[in-house]
Image (cartoon, grey):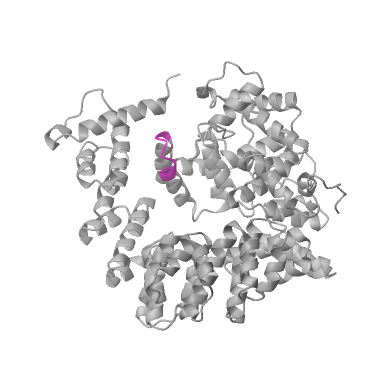
Amino acid sequence: MFSHRLFVRILLLAVSAVLLLPAAHAQKRVPGFAADDDIFLTLRNASRRNDVATAGEIAANLRDYPIPSYVEYYQLKPRIKDAPATEILAFLTRYNGTAIADRLRNDWLLELGRRRDWVTFDEQYPQFQLNDDTQLKCYALMWKALKGVHVADETRALLNVPKDFGEGCVALVTTLLQVHQFDTDDLWAQIRLAAETGSTDYVRRFVPLSGIDDGSLVTAMEKPALIIARGVGFRRVRHEVFVVALGRIAKSNPAQAADVLSHNTLLLNKKQEALGWAQIALQASMKLAPEAPEYWRKAGNAPLSLEGHQWKVRAALRAGDWKLVKAGIEAMPASLRDDATWTYWLARALREEGKTDLANARFQSIAPQTSFYGQLALEELGQKITIPPRAAAATEEEIAAMSSNAGFRRAFKFFDLDMRFEGYREWNWELRKMTDRQLLAAAEFARRSEVLDRMVNTSDRTKTEFDFTQRFPTPYRDIMRATTQRQGMEMAWVYGLIRQESRFIMNARSHVGASGLMQLMPATARYVAKKIGLNDFTHNQVNEIETNILLGTSYLNMVLSDLEGSQAMATAAYNAGPGRPRAWRSTLTRQVEGAIFAESIPFSETRDYVKKVLSNATYYAAMFEGKPQSLKARLGSVAPASFVPTELP
C-alpha cells in the first residue's frame, strides 16, 4: 500500500527544489505538480528554518490560500527581529482575537524582552491572552524590578522547577541580585535546581554571578568525583560547589554520596550539611532506594525543590512511614499541597493518626473530581465509582454554532494536513471561555466530524454537566469485543489504555515512532506478530485497525501474564517496557498498595500514564457493566517477587 504521507513528503521535496531556484522560476507553478496544501507545508518548514527569502518566495504562490493568517505568519515569524513595529501591529490588528495573533504577540514579546524595549513590552504584554510563557513572565518581573517593585517572592514561586528557563530568566536572576532583592542563597538555590536535571548549560550561565573563576562549578556537573577528591575546603563557594557535586554523585550512586558526606561534615555548617543530605535523598528516592527516608530525616528542614517535596513523600509512602508522609506534605508550598494527589495522601496520613473527621473532610474536597485521586477519595468515603447522569444532548442549533466556528474550521484544515500542533492550538483557543453547554456541543461536533481526540479533550473540560459517551468513546467495539474475548482480557482496560495512548487517532505516531490506536513500536509489533503466528505481517499493517488491536492486546496480555496479573504493573510495562516494573518492584521492602506503587514510579510520564489508564478503565467498566466499580481493587497490591502476599485493607 502506497502511503499518502510518503507521497506528500516526496511532493514537498520536489516543491522545495523548484522553489529554491531563482525567483523568476520560483513564481511559476508546474501544472498538476503540487497542490496548494503541499506548498503551504513547505512554507511552514521554511519559516521554521528562519529562511526569510524562501518563505517569501513560497508565500507568493499562496495568495488565495484559505488560511491567509498563517501564510502571513510564516512569512513574518522569521523576520521578527527586524520587522518594523508597524507591520507587526498591522498583523495583530488584522487578526485580533485569533490564536495565531496571540502566537505572534508571544514571539514579538520575547524579542522585545531580549532587546529590552520595555515601553513596547509594557504596551503588548497585558494583551497576551494565554500568558503561558515562563520566559515572558521573567521579562515582565525583570522590568518591574527595574522600576523598583519587589518581585523576589514572585520570582521564587515562578522559578521553582529545575529546567532551563532561557535568557530572560537568567537576566531576571541577575537583575534581582543587582538590585539586592536576591541574595547569594537565592543564586545557589537556582544553581541546585539546574543541577537536579543535569542542565550544565544553564549552570554555566550562572558562573559569572557565582564568583567562581576556576571552572569548578562546571567540573562539579561534569566530573563531580574530581570536586569530591579535592575536599570540602574552607570558603562558602567551595562548600556550595561540593554540595552540587554530591548531588551529581548521588545521581548514579546515592550510597557513595552518603558515605562521602558522612565523612566531610566538620567543615560544613548545619544548613550546608542538610542541603547535602537533601540532594542525596532526592536521588535516592528517584532510584527507589530503601535508605531514602533516612536521608530525608537527616536533611531536616532543608529548602527543597517541588520535585524534592514530592519525592520525600513518595519515599515515605513506600516505607509506610505515615508520620513522614504527613510532615512532608505539610511542608509543601500551598500550591503543591492543595493538589488532589497530596490532599488524598495527607487525608490518609490523618486517618492513620485517628483524625477521621479531618481526613474525611479532605477526601470530600476532592471526591467530586473525575480523576484518579478523586475516585480513590470517593472509595475512602465508602462509595464506589459510577457514571454520572448524562447531560441533555446538545441541540442542533448549539451544534450548528460550533460548525460555523472559524477557529474550528481552521483546526480541521490543519488536522487534514497532519499539522496536529497547529490544529490543537486553534481548537483549544476556541474552548477557553465556553460554558459547559457549549463544550458539550463542541464535543458533539467533533464526534460527528470523526475527530474523537478533540471530542474527548473537549468533553473532559466540563465541570457540572457530563456526557461520558463523549469522554469515554468505544469505537470499533465489535472488533474490540471479539479480540479481547478470544484472549480472555478485560475490554474496559484495553479501552482505557487506548484512550491514553492515542485518544483514538488511528494514524497517531509518537515522537519515538509508535503507531496506531495502541501505539506499537515497530520492534514490538514484529515480535508480537511472530509470537502469535502472524507470519505474513508487514509493518505497513500496523495502522490497520484489526491488526493494531490484535497486536496491542496480545502484547498487553503477554506482559499481564509475565507480571502475575497486576494491571498496575502491566500498564507500566506497556509504557516503559516490562523490565522496569520488575526493577521497581525489586526495591520494595514490603507489600504496598497499587496506588503507592503507581505514585512512586520514577518516570513522570509512566507515573501519569498508569494512573490515567486505570482511572479510565474503571469508568469504562462502570459503563460496560452498568454497576459501581472499585479502582482500589483494580490497582490491587504490589510486593517483592519473593514476598508472600497478604490482603491489604
The reply to whether residue 469 is visible in this rendering is: no
Residue found 82% across the figure and 45% down from its top: 642
Pick the front one: 561 or 455: 561
State whether the magenta stretch is mostly helix, strand or loop.
helix
> Which residues are drawn in magenta?
416-423
Position of the C terminus by quadrant: bottom right
Residue 422 in the magenta stretch? The answer is yes
Q: In this image, 189 relative to 307: left or right?
A: left
Q: In this image, 354 relative to 81: left or right?
A: right
Residue 195 percent across, percent down from the top left: 50, 64
Q: In this image, 364 relative to 140: left or right?
A: right
Residue 605 percent across, percent down from the top left: 58, 49
Residue 33 sits above or below residue 584 on the image: above
Residue found 54% across the figure and 40% down from its top: 453
Q: Quadrant of residue 419?
A: top left
Residue found 66% across the figure and 23% down from its top: 531
Q: Residue furthest top?
A: 536
Residue 73 sits above or below residue 403 on the image: below
Residue 562 percent across, percent down from the top left: 73, 35
Residue found 48% across the figure and 61% down from its top: 223
Residue 499 percent across, percent down from the top left: 61, 40
Position of the N terminus by quadrant: top left
Pick the front one: 409 or 493: 493
Residue 382 sits above or below residue 56 on the image: below
Residue 496 in the magenta stretch? The answer is no
